Amino acid sequence: METDFRWLRQVKSVHVIGASKKSHKPSNRLFLDMKNRGWRLIPINPQFVGDMVHGLPFRQWPQDEQSELFVAFLSPESTLEFLKKWMYMHPSRPHIWLQPGAESDDVIYWLKQVNWSYTSSICWVETTLQRDLFCENPYGNLSWYIQHRDETSHCSIWRFVNHESSIQAIAKESVEWVGDLVDLEIDQHQIPKYIRTLQKADETLEETALRLSMG
């Protein structure tokens, strides 16, 4: 009996664990294949923080507040390490989609032991394309923001990046925070929390972020 994946339509944010900059990798092509289907795609790879993949900024780690679906492109060993770290740090259990190559008997056994919902042995991209699935309530095009330390002045610089724009890669050691408008609204990190305190009564948070930007 074919599995019903219509629940994916209700998902708004998809964290791509192990996203790659290499264009031949499935974890890179995903962002092109799924670009116009409404999901908020979030590339997770601490190695590439400060850089982008198809216009989206790499994040070091998912934010607990909006995590709904993890699509894992890691090795089984790294997948298990990631999941154990997540469980230690956060109470939530986003659905984990194990891409082919990320699953193993050990990973599946562990997920069953901790009662964590998962999908395995099939590709998330192929599944959604074959069933012609779209996000039913998308966020739309989101601007994003980065705060980094300037290596010359050693001052922190806040930058607003339009969803149609791009920036030069920034050394990951200099990045203090990066995220989109959803992150800016809910992330409890000290930087977005501080930005929220600067919002004026007559402006949106996005307008505040733009006003504070160095350009």
Image: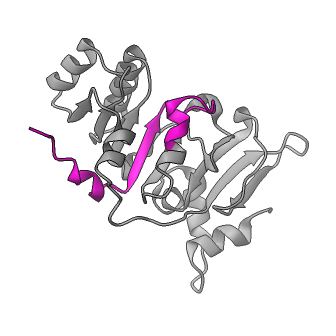
Camera sees residue 68: no
Where 28 falls versus 112 (above or below)? Answer: below
**Residue plotted at (45% across, 38% down):** 16
Residue 79 lies within the magenta run: no
Where 68 falls versus 213 (above or below)? Answer: above
Where 177 falls versus 106 (above or below)? Answer: below
Percent coordinates x, y for residue 81 in the rendering: 39, 20
Residue range (magenta): 1-30
Q: Which residue occupies the foreground of this view, 3 or 160?
A: 3
Residue placed furthest toward the left: 1
Camera sees residue 131: yes
**Residue plotted at (35% across, 34% down):** 123
**Residue plotted at (57% across, 68% down):** 197
**Residue plotted at (74% across, 64% down):** 213
Location of the C terminus (image quadrant): bottom right
Residue 23 lies within the magenta run: yes
